[in-house]
Image: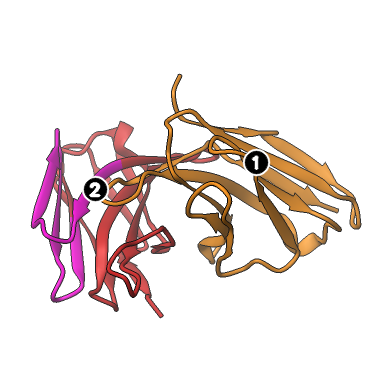
């Protein structure tokens, strides 16, 4: 059974710091990995999607890397801002026996990020 | 706006009552999913529909039924609500790989 772990569970930093959020997964037979942001009481917003054949993806101040063989992904946030405060969720999409994937994302518990002005 | 729309946003039920959570997407996605989110448990898959006309159980299907009405709509039904079903329910959709998921804004359900 795929298990996804995110470290740290919570992080509080002053504005301007560069941050690294970690995600690890136990089964390397993944199709892709997706990072989401969730604001309190809201839904999930997709940040970055990395395919299993890719090493990293970038969007603005966000950079996500993937090391499939070691079962790890990191989300790097540059020059953090108070508006980055949210819960960040990592989710992996497994391959099925036929080599495709019809869903079943497995989520980590999330990292609660607070950026102080 | 394009995306996944869930109704209602909030609901309070009494134990034993039934209700249907509605979900619709306008992105022509093939697959649709229902997740529940609970403190300390994260997001867990209840049911999914890989394509129109098919549905399959996820990790926590007991107490729920689903209907893939057409390609756009995927509903979740609680036949006899229990306090253990108090949760936030999210609907999501996706094209076949390599696409990612799009989530709705959620339904906050309380069963008293």
Q: Colour of chain A?
A: red
Up the image or down, A9 lies above or below A87; here it is below
Residue sticking out furthest to the top: B1
> Main SS type for the magenta part?
strand
Would residue A70 be seen by someone viewing this image from the given angle?
yes
Q: Mark 2 lies on which chain?
A: A
Q: In which quadrant of the rendered image does the N terminus of chain B lie?
A: top left
Query: At x 30% / y 34%, what residue is drawn?
Result: A82
Query: At x 46% / y 43%, what residue is drawn?
Result: B93
* Relative depth, front residue between B19 and A77: B19
- Tell me whether circle 1 and circle 2 mark residues in contact (CB < 8 Å): no
Residue sticking out furthest to the front: B53
Q: Quick check: do tags 1 and 2 share a chain? A: no
* Residue A73 falls left or right of residue A87: left
Would residue B38 be seen by someone viewing this image from the given angle?
no
Q: Which residue in the structure is indicated by mark 2?
A: A49
Image location (x, y in percent) of residue B3: 45, 29
Q: How far is the residue under mark 1 from the one under mark 2?
A: 29 Å
């Amino acid at each position: 059974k795929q298990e996804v772990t995110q470290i740290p569970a919570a992080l509080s930093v002053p504005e301007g710091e560069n941050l690294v959020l970690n995600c690890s997964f136990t089964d390397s037979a993944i199709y892709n990995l997706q990072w989401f942001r969730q604001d309190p009481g809201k839904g999930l917003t997709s940040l970055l999607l990395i395919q299993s054949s890719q090493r990293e993806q970038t969007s603005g101040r966000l950079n996500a890397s993937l090391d499939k063989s070691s079962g790890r992904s990191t989300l790097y946030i540059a020059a953090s801002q108070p508006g980055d405060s949210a819960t960040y969720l990592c989710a992996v999409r497994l391959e099925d026996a036929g080599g495709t994937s019809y869903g079943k994302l497995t989520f980590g518990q999330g990292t609660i990020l607070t950026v102080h002005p | 706006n394009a995306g996944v729309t869930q109704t209602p946003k909030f609901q309070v039920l009494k134990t034993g009552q039934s209700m249907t959570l509605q979900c619709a997407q306008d992105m022509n996605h093939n697959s649709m999913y229902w997740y529940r989110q609970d403190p300390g448990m994260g997001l867990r898959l209840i049911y999914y529909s890989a394509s129109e006309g098919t549905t399959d159980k996820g990790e926590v299907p007991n107490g729920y039924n689903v209907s893939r009405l057409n390609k756009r709509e995927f509903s979740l039904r609680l036949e006899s609500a229990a306090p253990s079903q108090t949760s936030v329910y999210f609907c999501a959709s996706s094209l076949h790989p390599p696409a990612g998921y799009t989530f709705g804004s959620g339904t906050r359900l309380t069963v008293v």
